Image (tube, grey):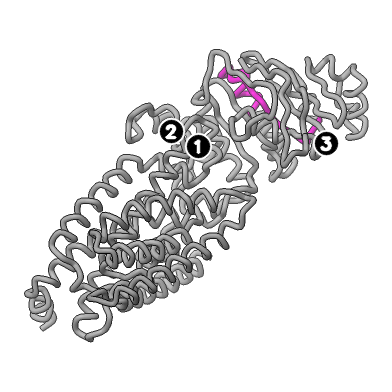
Amino acid sequence: MIACENVSFAYDGVVVLSDLSFNINKGDYVCVVGENGSGKSTLIKGILGLKSPIKGSIAFEGMDKRDIGYLPQSAQMSSDFPSSVNEAVLSGRLNSMGKRAFFDKKDKQEAKKAMELMDIYDIRGKSFGELSGGQRQRVLLARALCSAKKLLVLDEPAAALDPKASYEMYQLVKRINDEMGITILMVSHDCRSAIEFASHILHLGRTRYFYGLKEDYIESDIGKNYLCIWGCEHHVH
Amino acid sequence: MFINAIQEIFSHAFMVRALITGLFISVTAAVVGVSLVLKRYSMIGDGLSHVGFGALAVSTALGFAPLAVAVPVVIIAAFFLLRLSNSAKLKGDAAIALISTASLAIGVLAVSLSGTNADLNSYLFGSIIAVSKPDMYLSVALSVIVGAIYVVLYNRIFSVTFDEEFTTATGANTGAYNMLIAISTAITVVLGMRVMGALLISSLIIFPCLTAMRVFKTYKGVMLCSCVLAAFTFFAGLVASFMLKTPTGATIVLVNLVAYLVFYAVGKLRAGVLR
């Protein structure tokens, strides 16, 4: 579905990722792990077309940008923006509108379904800016669900959440992957969730990369090393 | 007695022209202003008004039709300022300040060099007598066009304003919407300058949204409230300025300030009650 070939990214001439190649297939659950500054978010931005690679190519097969749902890092949103929960979630249906000017019944139904799944339908009239971090994250995930037809991209979905809420978030993402057949590409600090839920791991190290099945990652040197640092080895089995 | 006063005011043809022109422009400015304020582009509106002043002054001095020159010049400036404020490398706000003061200086020089019937005061602070019939028709027509664009693209403009990255990532051409916002702002600024003047037009853009945001917390609420506020404050300011013989533009800005303070208090009270 997504083919990355020898892509490199740079900020102001400093290369942050070089010669990375991998393929994501339909239905995969790919978790991107690695230290801070290893280029995880940069790669996500590249795949979403928000940043151009200096080298290599990223190609979509059997999908285009309008099939993507995206959950950005929550920190970017301003809290005084006037928007109801409903307005924010509905805006995820924009890429299904084609040439229509306004949302129709189906758009509103899809938004309702997404809000019910995220358990935010009761607060749909509330102001987005007045919500807690966890609630906001649910709203943005509902919006991402509305726009995701084939691929859901999540950048640190649990960064602002407490442990219980983040575990629920990961379970929800897994359900979306299983029940709706939506491909998942997720950046995460949390290697436990990566090991528990993902089908594939993309590890971005400073000097080397790993891409492959989770099972192979656990057995690899780079994987053993990383999981050991984070004290996750006992979660493996 | 109040009704009589209103009737007397609008028995003057120029006041009727000012009212119609001003109502259309102020509501359009409010609509455009919501996206500018929320995208943190308020300074662009202000910068454009100074560019507009320079363009109007120069074109008048050279004997061209003022609006025909000013509208395209300000649209080009809008493209430019938008690009500047989007680039992280250049100091966007400093560049905007530079362009706006330079335009202001060029305008003042053009007015003083030409020295004929051009009145510096009316450019800078607006003049309701300056609104001619063709001005009125043009203002109404362009306001209706800009308004229609904002209605048709309402949901898209919301999304671009709320979260530009998400909107780009999921397949929309956000660059085009940003340009559209810039062009609409440019048109509104140039038209509004006739009534409000270069120094006060940006208040028509910024005040209604900021005021509405004190009380309303949804996008639709802020949008509708801004439009009503813009129409009301313009009308109240126009009538007050006629009765008190004060400058129109400044009076309208003061009415807007009072409305802001009232909404601020209401917002605070409400938050207190809810807590």
The residue to which callout 2 is attached is: A94
- Nearer to us in this view, B140 or B8: B140
* Chain to which mark 3 belongs: A
Q: Secondary structure at mark 3?
A: loop
Q: Which secondary structure lies at badge 1?
A: helix
Q: Which mark is residue A205?
A: none
Is B188 included in the stretch rendered in magenta?
no
Q: Is residue A190 magenta?
A: yes
**What residue type is disc 3 on?**
Glu
Dot 2: what SS? Answer: helix
Residues at discs 1 and 2 both on one chain: no
Quarter assignment of residue B134? bottom left
Q: CA distance from mark 1 to mark 2?
A: 8 Å
Viewed as shown, does residue A224 lie left or right of A40? right
Query: What's drawn in magenta, residue-wise?
Result: A173-191
Q: Which residue is mark 1?
A: B167
> How many C-alpha atoms fall within 10 Å of the one at disc 2: few (<14), some, or many (≥20)?
many
Quadrant of residue B186 within the rendered picture:
bottom left
Q: Earlier in the sequence, mark 3 or mark 2?
A: 3
Q: Are marks 3 and 2 on the same chain?
A: yes
Between B62 and A30, the one lying in front of the other is B62
For disc 3, the marked residue is A35
Q: Numbered disc 2: what chain? A: A
At x 54%, y 52%, the residue is: B84
Q: Looking at numbered disc 2 in the image, what kind of residue is underneath it?
A: Leu
